[in-house]
């Protein structure tokens, strides 16, 4: 085998005269009447190699080589030996780094052929996702996906070097562990050696990292796969990558400081972007009020205003009654001349699908607010509204009069719809002061984050009397409207942990059977501790401005949790299932055509 | 909370006079009549803190502090504020880095208490493995385990930095993938969204790394968990850590070069040990002949010699008949005066358990070989034996006359038993020139490594006629008698891959259903490629001279694949199993006492 002496992206004018061996894929093929040009590609770049042009009079066999070059096709794998020459004047290609030179081929080895391609590698967008995932290895050759994977690789290295440098110890936590559902379902793994028993794949290493703190490891981190068996929403994957970390003897400030430094290093090294520090910070309530969400995209300047009190004094029935049971809030679109009535109709339909009973609006024309509903408002009230939103001529205000939840959901949706943020900009912020609990469907309490999150010390006295008012010591990190991570100070007292379980309706027996090992560990000298977990796929996609995490996952699954490449999941031998002490309850899917 | 301003291992004489805050665990407690000394420990070291000795006349409340210090117990978590002082002359402790100083406590905060300990942390060896694994977090505080985990952490970082620096790209391969058993059983993961179908956890990313090569990634690596559902032997774990890598356009030499450089860096940086390069290399047959195993410990100088031909000419029936159907081989123990007859009796029993029909021996006394059997040998034959083993007076030779397999197994066992290698020494070597196939139980062929291993090009002509003679392009790496990794050049031709499947009895239909996606990918321009996989747990244990991989795994399982810490695997709600389209076939284990 001819072994490459240099990569396909390396040669420059200064290499002219050298003899080299290149290997790679035939990326394109051009026959210019007796001379054949091939763009030879490897993972580092492209070099033009030439058949049929002698580099020196003594070079033999150009005829034979030229003939063989005619049998080459796109994506054949070849190695060539040849001489580097400067391209003839006027034929240089300044678009590629090797554009000054070409390699005149003296020897050709065909290392492999390639079947007819299922899609044009230069236009992968022309086929559906199923096909791209099935031939993921071909998509990888197309540049964009390769670039994403290399970016993620660099993110991995920068991340580990950063945390190692800060004294964090990378420690592996088990994949075959105990089922302790934390909101989502666990993937189960039947045990053959212990039939009828199951391991679970971890939804996160949460309990183990707390155990490590009890073990005195003090600073832990890990980049690790986690698993959730969810009905897949648009951009979720059953397995995803988490950057997990935990520290002892710290408080919120320490964690936020170290993570801001980390994000700063990451953005600077990977993107050349300087993040402004300290990051902005928003309380949960304020974020919900101003942006309708706890993951606001702060590149978007549109802000929500509450006019519930003003609306209660109006004579517009819709607003008046909403003000009694819910809220009236609005968002202003500055200079909205381009938003037509039919746009408004469309948006009305869209927020209706999100549960809104209607979408009111007013336009600032000439001296004041005008629309079909302004007749129900006194000029004084209209003035108050105008002042609240600080409108100028041309501005448009949309209103939602509904429950707080619906108003937040719809106005957040409208914010996103009415402003297209600058894709080259990054806005990052902390969201904190979350309530510790929220109401569950049966009117009880459930943790807003997870049950190991510590309450604010000054709110502990409210735990029994007014649990809804207890704030948590949780903090989330939001990048351009996407939650890229979250964390909290944890409970390090076994007693307090048991109280929290009790409030969220976990009986002592259940707590013992699900989390007994954590409760036990907390009794043996657990230090104060807290931590964080990044969704690495989402963070990477956010930094690269990609719309889907699938673009940064080498082998993602479809929304049906299926791999078009391997056909996983798939039926297995009945014997394999039998050996696990199990039986398939539902009939296996019939084969196609049966 | 008092937050530490400095770690417990940091203070030196030069810090005297500083005010500091330390936090950690009470490691020991001594009351010297009115003055209480506590060794305060964190992950970085220990500092002596003192209660009841004023650092300055103005310091208030020593009485109160002293009283509170009496309530402290071992493994309580505390923070103290105090002044660093040089220890009084004569009381310095040169055994610890902070032994010049102590901290006179001015403020104490008890951060957590600790229940009565299940074992003495200073003597974890006194309790069984089950207890240690159940309280793994306590064992972590004892130093040795922590040290192992930190070593592994450093190995991880050095490894990734090395391969990143060599242009390898870290790429994640899926955990939820297709069941393609490679020798061992897969762990299966039932799919809820596709009932009756299963994912499998990967035994290795083998197929995916080959797919990545087809995808043009050219240099891939990953440190990743792999899974094997085996009946656990002494030192196996159901999940283990693999350093996986693959390269394109290379041959054996390239991979061996880069891995030798890697091992060199690792040993130098982590152990300060310089490995001699290039590593020694042994052919499989030679290794079996000289050491009875393909994982020889070369720190052990004892070597096996074959005397089959000589034995066939002797009149000793046992040797003569073994020479006809098997082999007669022996190993010499130099200066074996201390090996007594009762030692020999014991060894005879041990090799009998390994299948040997007997254990013959001869001792070199005075001028020649002597034992109960020497009377069956002519002086000339005895001379030949003596010359073959190059014996001197005092030497002892053990012989096994048996099948090749049994002779290898028993003589390798004897080598290990009769020589205790230097634990501070490292002997590393390549073993290669393996046969591609070995006989399976039904008399067919199975791959000695895995079915994607390429045959030596010059042996391909023997594939159909004499498959047993085909050598593979596989190479294993052996450290001190332990296989720490293995790899090969892979098959990159779909056609050749199909031929190999055929020889090992995989029908085209089965090949398609199990490995169809690889066979397909090989058709689309697969480059020549090869790679390697290290067993990181074994490599780490080998470098640290630890007898078990459990010592380098933070949360290992027992031989019954059980976690005493979490109690995984465990029964789950019937509903969870039902939702997966499954039923438990065997009754769940009864609760204790039922």
Image (cartoon, coloured by chain):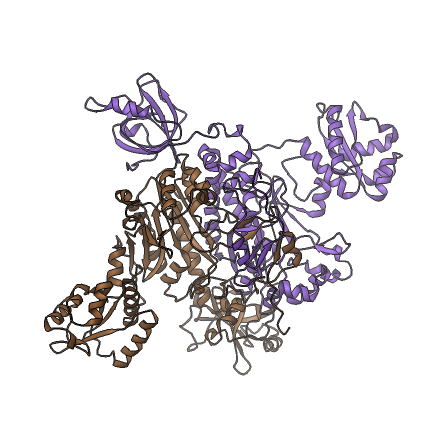
Chain colours: A purple, B brown
Task: Choose between B348 and A417: the one closer to the eye.
Answer: B348
**Is B307 rendered above or below residue B222?**
below
Picture coordinates of residue A478, whole percent (x, y)? 61, 44
Q: Number of callouts in the render?
A: 0
Q: Is residue A410 visible?
A: yes
Q: Would residue A311 be found to the left or right of residue A542 on screen? A: right
**Left or right, residue A150 beside residue B359:** right
Q: Nearer the viewer, residue A367 or A594?
A: A594
- As drawn, B492 above or below B25: above
Give coordinates of residue A35: x percent, y percent: 31, 19
In the rendered image, the quadrant that contains the N terminus of chain A is: top left
Figure quadrant of the C terminus of chain A: top right
- In the image shown, does B570 or A365 lie closer to the viewer? B570
Quarter of the image where one finds residue B427: bottom left
Query: Visible in this render: residue B332?
Result: no
Q: Position of residue B15 (x, y in %)?
A: 46, 65
Identify the residue at image location x=39%, y=37%.
B526
Quadrant of residue B534 in the image?
bottom left
| Above or below: residue B284 compared with residue B351 | above
A332 left or right, relative to B572? right
């Amino acid at each position: 085998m001819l072994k490459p002496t240099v990569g396909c992206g390396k040669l420059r004018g200064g290499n002219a005269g050298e003899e080299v061996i290149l290997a790679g894929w035939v990326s394109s093929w051009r026959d210019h009447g007796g001379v054949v040009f091939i763009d030879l590609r490897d993972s580092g770049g492209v070099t033009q190699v030439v058949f049929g042009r002698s580099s020196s009079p003594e070079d033999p066999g150009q005829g034979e080589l030229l003939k063989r070059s005619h049998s080459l096709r796109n994506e054949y794998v070849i190695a060539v030996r040849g001489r580097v020459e400067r391209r003839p004047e006027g034929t240089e290609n300044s678009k590629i780094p090797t554009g000054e030179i070409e390699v005149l081929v003296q020897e050709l080895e065909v290392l492999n052929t390639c079947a007819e391609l299922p899609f044009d590698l230069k236009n992968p967008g022309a086929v559906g996702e199923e096909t791209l995932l099935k031939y993921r290895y071909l998509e990888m050759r197309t540049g964009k996906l390769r670039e994403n994977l290399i970016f993620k690789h660099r993110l991995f290295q920068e991340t580990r070097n950063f945390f190692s440098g800060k004294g964090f110890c990378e420690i592996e936590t088990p994949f075959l562990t105990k089922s302790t559902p934390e909101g989502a379902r666990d993937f189960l793994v039947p045990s053959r050696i212990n039939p009828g028993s199951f391991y679970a794949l971890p939804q996160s290493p949460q309990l183990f990292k707390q155990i490590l703190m009890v073990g005195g490891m003090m600073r832990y981190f890990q980049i690790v796969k986690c698993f959730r068996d969810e009905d897949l929403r648009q951009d979720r994957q059953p397995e995803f990558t988490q950057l997990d970390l935990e520290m002892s003897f710290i408080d919120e400030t320490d964690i936020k400081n170290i993570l801001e430094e980390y994000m700063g290093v990451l953005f600077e090294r990977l993107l050349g972007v300087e993040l402004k520090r300290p990051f902005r910070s928003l309380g949960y309530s304020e974020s919900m009020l101003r942006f309708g969400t706890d993951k606001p995209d702060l590149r978007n300047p549109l802000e929500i205003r509450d006019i519930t009190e003003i609306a209660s004094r109006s004579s517009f029935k819709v607003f008046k009654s909403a003000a009694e049971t819910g809220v009236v809030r609005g968002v202003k679109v500055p200079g909205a001349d381009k938003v037509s009535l039919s746009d408004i109709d469309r948006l009305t339909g869209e927020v209706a699908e999100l549960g809104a009973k209607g979408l009111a609006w007013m336009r600032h024309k000439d001296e004041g607010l005008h629309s079909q509903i302004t007749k129900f408002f006194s000029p004084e009230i209209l003035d108050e509204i105008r002042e609240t939103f600080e409108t100028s001529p041309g501005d448009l205000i949309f209103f939602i009069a509904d429950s707080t939840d619906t108003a937040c959901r719809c106005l957040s949706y409208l914010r996103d719809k009415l402003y297209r943020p600058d894709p080259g900009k990054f806005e990052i912020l902390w969201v904190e002061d979350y309530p510790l609990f929220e109401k569950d469907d049966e009117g009880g309490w459930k943790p807003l984050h997870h049950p190991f999150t510590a309450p604010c010390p000054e709110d502990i006295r409210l735990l029994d009397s007014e649990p809804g008012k207890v704030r948590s010591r949780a903090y989330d990190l939001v990048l351009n409207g996407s939650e890229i991570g979250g964390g909290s100070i944890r409970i390090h007292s076994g007693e307090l942990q048991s109280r929290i379980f009790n409030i969220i309706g976990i009986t002592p027996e259940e707590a013992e059977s699900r989390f007994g090992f954590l409760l036990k560990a907390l009794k043996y000298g657990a230090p104060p501790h807290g931590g964080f977990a990044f969704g690495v796929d989402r963070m990477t996609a956010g930094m690269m401005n990609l719309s889907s995490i699938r673009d940064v996952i080498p082998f993602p699954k479809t929304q049906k949790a299926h791999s078009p490449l391997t056909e996983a999941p798939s039926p297995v031998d009945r014997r394999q299932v039998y050996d696990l002490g199990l039986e398939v309850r539902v009939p296996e899917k019939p084969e196609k055509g049966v």
